[in-house]
Image (tube, grey):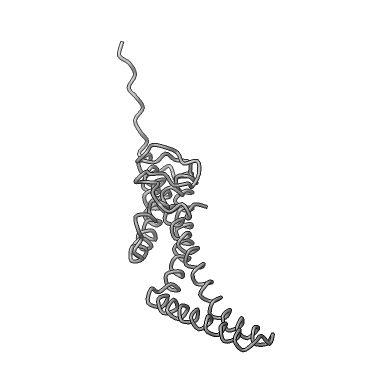
Amino acid sequence: MNSPSPPLPHPTDALRIQTWNRALEADGTAALFEARSRRLNRRLNALSFAGFGIPIIVGIVAAIGVSASALELVVIVAAMLGGIQLVWSLWSLIAHWSDKNSHAVQSMMTNRQLAESYTRLATHPPSDVTELQNAFDLIEARDSSQRDSDLAQEITRKERRYGMRSALFTRQKACAGCNVVPTSMKPTKCGVCGDFPKRWAK
């Protein structure tokens, strides 16, 4: 007696898998840009504080009425710090910190929305494969445009690995490189979901 043939896969199965994969990728991209925004915000905040803080400190010291020699020392130190702050400000302009931070925030929000759209579609797909394909194509068109914009932002390999680990950790999926489901954001030596600075871990 012949054994029964295995059931044929539903026509929508392959497309649903692709949709889940895109959701994972969008989650990872959102995470890496969120982390980048946090780093840039810290730099910009420190720069702003230095710009206002140094003159205020000198003014307070002068108002207290310290000795001339002490005030002279404070002014010299403030001038040195001011020079460092000026060079730092110049570098922030050359490196486009503000522009990069604005893009990071925008990309984070857009990729979160894309991940949610992909997830909803994969969770509750239309039964008709054509309808599913059309819905997927609509999301993918927005995703493709955002990916092109993100590629211009010079994403590093370490950032990509951080984003992958964040997405795998959030969705509790096994890494394709080490076959491990992340239980934390602590980096490992994996070339797919690890090998990024420990300070990036939440």
Where residue 115 sits in the image (x, y, percent)? 46, 53
Q: Residue at x 37, y 54 (%)?
A: 158
Q: Does residue 61 appear left or right of residue 179 in this picture?
A: right
Pick the quarter of the image with the N terminus: top left
Q: Position of residue 101 (x, y in %)?
A: 46, 69
Number of marks: 0
Where's residue 93, x and y in %? Answer: 41, 78
User: In the picture shown, does residue 43 fall above or below 125?
Assistant: below
Along the line of sight, the residue nearer the viewer: 105 or 49: 49
Residue placed most toward the observer, 76 or 179: 76
In this picture, is 5 found above or below 180? above
- Quarter residue 50 falls in: bottom right
Q: Nearer the viewer, residue 113 or 12?
A: 113
Q: Residue furthest left?
A: 2
Q: Residue furthest top?
A: 1
Q: Residue furthest right?
A: 64
Q: Nearer the viewer, residue 126 or 111?
A: 111
Q: Position of residue 132 (x, y in %)?
A: 40, 48
Residue 30, quarter of the rendered image = bottom left
